[in-house]
Structure formats: C-alpha cells, structure tokens
C-alpha cells in the first residue's frame, strides 16, 4: 500500500511539475491604486493557492476552538458523573460495634 501511495504521489508531482514548466510566461496582476505586480503565471497561481489555504485555516480556527471547549465541558461532565456513580455504588458503612 505504501508503494502505491508513493507511486501516486510521484505521478501527481510529475503532472504539477509539467504544468509549472508549461506556464512560465509573464503575467500582470493589476491591483488597486494603480499598483501592478508582474511575475510568472505559475508563481501567481501558487501564491493565490497558498493564500486561499491560509484563509481557509483561519476561517476554521473559531470552529476548532469551539469544539475543543465543548469537548472539555463534556469530559468534565463525564468525570463528575463517573465520580458520583462510584460514590453511589459503595456499600453502606456498617453500624459501629462497641467491644464488650
């Protein structure tokens, strides 16, 4: 299985490398306020891909923290219920016996 995944990764790398070699022409990116950025098309695509990935991770951050907080609350509740169940399952204490 590891061989198959390595082979698939190698094929995908070759495809992306060929794509990068075919798209080396210069492109102009026109920004606001008459700014212009010039560079190879493949670098522009890579930059926008990375920026999108970073924005996606940042968008998920509040959700991840909310789920972690809820998980910790549930763990606390489970621990409290387990400790109260252990106390309820203890046998009753015997009456005190005085020696004669």
Image (cartoon, rainbow, N blue to C red):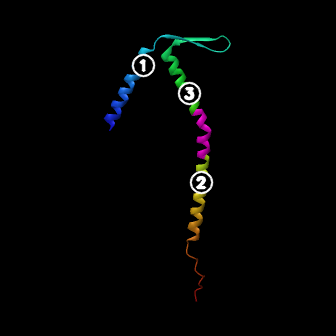
Q: Mark 3 against mark 1, which lies toward the viewer? A: 1
Tell me the quadrant of the picture where the N terminus can be found.
top left
Image height of 20 relative to 6, above or below: above
**Residue position marked by numbered label 3 in the rendering:** 52
**Distance in Å between CA atoms under marks 1 and 2:** 48 Å
Please give the name of the residue rendered at 52% of the width and 25% of the height, measured from the top-left corner: 49
Please give the name of the residue rendered at 54% of the width and 29% of the height, measured from the top-left corner: 53
Please give the name of the residue rendered at 58% of the width and 41% of the height, measured from the top-left corner: 64
Q: Quadrant of residue 33?
A: top right
Label 2 Cα crowd, 10 Å radius (few <14 / some 14-19 / many 20+): few
Q: Which mark is residue 74?
A: 2
**Residue position marked by numbered label 1 in the rendering:** 19
Tell me where the magenta segment starts and ends, as one range: 57-68
**Distance in Å between CA atoms under marks 3 and 1:** 20 Å
Total numbered labels: 3
Q: What secondary structure is marked by label 1?
A: helix
Q: What secondary structure is marked by label 2?
A: helix
Image height of 95 relative to 57, above or below: below
Is tag 3's residue or tag 1's residue first in the polypeptide sequence? 1
Image height of 71 relative to 36, above or below: below
Q: Quadrant of residue 20?
A: top left
**Relative image position of residue 61 (x, y in whole percent):** 60, 37
């Amino acid at each position: 299985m590891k061989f198959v995944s390595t082979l698939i990764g190698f094929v995908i790398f070759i495809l992306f490398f060929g794509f990068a070699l075919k798209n080396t022409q210069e492109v102009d990116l026109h920004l606001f306020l008459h700014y212009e950025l010039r560079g190879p098309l493949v670098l522009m695509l890579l930059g926008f891909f990375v920026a999108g990935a970073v924005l996606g991770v940042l968008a998920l951050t509040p959700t991840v923290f909310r789920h972690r907080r809820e998980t910790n609350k549930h763990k606390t509740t489970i621990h409290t219920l387990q400790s109260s169940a252990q106390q309820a399952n203890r046998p009753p204490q015997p009456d005190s016996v005085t020696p004669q």
